[in-house]
Amino acid sequence: MAFNGDLESRLALHWLVHERGCQVLSLSINLGQEIYLEPLGELALELGASAAQVIDRRHSFLVDYAFPILQADAVYQHGCFLGSALARYLIAEELVRVAHEEGSDMVAHAASMKGNDQVRMETAIGAQDPNLKVLAPVREWNLKNLADKVRYAAARNLPIEEPFASPVLVDRNLWGASLFFTNENDAWDEVPAETFVMTNPVEKAPNEPATIVIGFREGIPVSLDGKEMEPIPLVRELNRIGGLHGIGRSDVVEDRLFGIKSREVYETPAASILLTAHRDLESLVHSKEMHQIREMLSRRYAEFVYAGLWFHDVRRALDGFFRETQMVVTGEVRLRLYKGSFRVKGRRSPNSIFEPKLANQTNLEMFESQWAKGFTTLWALQARLAARMQPKKSPRRPAQDE
C-alpha cells in the first residue's frame, strides 16, 4: 500500500488490516517533500502493517519523470506543471515493482475518489500489470466527510494528527507544491498569505535582484552559474533561490479529468525557472517549423500526462519526438529574478542558428536586393490574385441611432 501518513492513508491502512483482514506492506517514497520520512515506517507498523518500506526515489523522479516533462515544455492549461501527476506515476511504478518482489496480487492506495489521482494511479498500475487487483478503501468505506473520519479514528484510538489544525493540505515534491484547501474556497477569495510553503510573498523578497545562469546539455539542466551540479542539488537550489525571490506562485481555475472546475494553487519555483530558460534556449536553436509543431505537441503531451496516460503508447511516442528535438538544446541562459518576476537577459549556444548580420535590417551584406524583391512579389501574389478575381465586399458601417 502507498502510504504517505495523511489522515486518509492512516485510516485506509487500518481499514485494510482490521476490516478486510489483509496483510499489508506499506510503501513510503521520498520525492523531495523536504520532511523526514523515516517515522512513517514506524507509524505504519503501529497502525497494523506487517512490514514497512521507506525509500528514496528523488533522482528517478527528476530524471525519468520531471526532465522529460521539461524537454517537452509541458504545462497543463494555465499553470499546472504536473508535479503531482508525475509523483503518482512513480508511486504506481514502485507499487508494481514491490508487489512483484513480494509475490502479491494486490496493491492499494488512499487517493480521493473525487480527484484525478485515483485515475492516474490505477491507470498506471493497470498499464504495467493488468493482473494486479487494486484496493481503494476510500471508495468502499462509508466515511463521507472529515467528521466521519475523525469519529472513526477516535472510536479505534488511532494515532492521527489534529485534522482541523491547518486549512491547507500540501502535496510537495521536487517539482513543486500543490496546495489543497480543506474547506471550500471561492474562486473570488484571495489566497491567504500563510498558505504558501515554498515561496516568499513579494513584499518580503530581497530588494536586490539576483542573476543566475542555467546550463543545459541536450535539454537537461546540468549547471548553475557555471558550476556542474547533479539533478537533485540543482533543482533544490533553484527552489531555494526562486522561493526566496517569490518566484513560481500560481492561482488558477483548471479542468479536472472528470470535467469539474477546480481552483488550484501551486508553487513551482524551480520548474517555472527551468521551463522559461529551456523554452528560450530552444528559440535560439530550433527552426520556425520546429517551434510551431513543438508548441502544438507540447500541449497534447501535457494533456496526456494530466489525464493519467503516462504509460500510453502515444505519450511514449511523443517522448521519442521530444528527445530528438533536444539533441541541439545545449547552451546557457541568463535570468534576472526580482520581486516575484523573472526575465531572460541573455542566451548562448554552440548550436545557435541566430545570425546577427542576417537579422540586422540595415546590413545588406548577406542579403541581395533581388532576393527581397522576388520573395516579396511571390508572397504577395496570392493576395493580388484574390483581389483581382473575387468580388469586393462593402465595408460594414456601424448602425446609426434613430
Image (cartoon, rainbow, N blue to C red):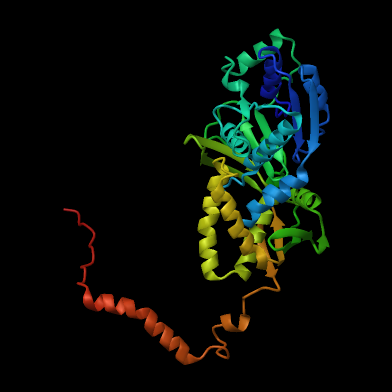
Count of numbered tags: 0
- Residue 70, position in %: x, y? 65, 54
Question: Is any atom of residue 78 visible in this view?
Answer: no
Q: Which residue lies furthest to the top in this view?
A: 155
Q: In x, y percent, where is residue 85?
A: 62, 40
Looking at this view, is 107 or 192 the one in front?
Answer: 107
- Measured from the top left, where is residue 357 in percent x and y? 61, 84
Looking at the image, which is closer to me, 36 or 323? 323
Residue 320 sits above or below residue 249 on the image: below
Give the quarter of the image for residue 325.
bottom right
Q: Which residue is drawn at 54% across and 83% down?
A: 361
In this rendering, the answer to whether 392 lies above or below 57 is below
Instruction: Indicate left or right for 390 with 101 as reference.
Output: left
Q: Which residue is drawn at 57% across and 40% down?
A: 308
Answer with the quarter of the image where residue 230 lies: bottom right
Residue at image point 76% right, 17% down: 47
Q: Does 180 sit above or below residue 269?
A: above
Question: In the figure, 78 relative to 46: above or below?
Answer: below
Residue 327 position, x and y percent, is: 66, 66
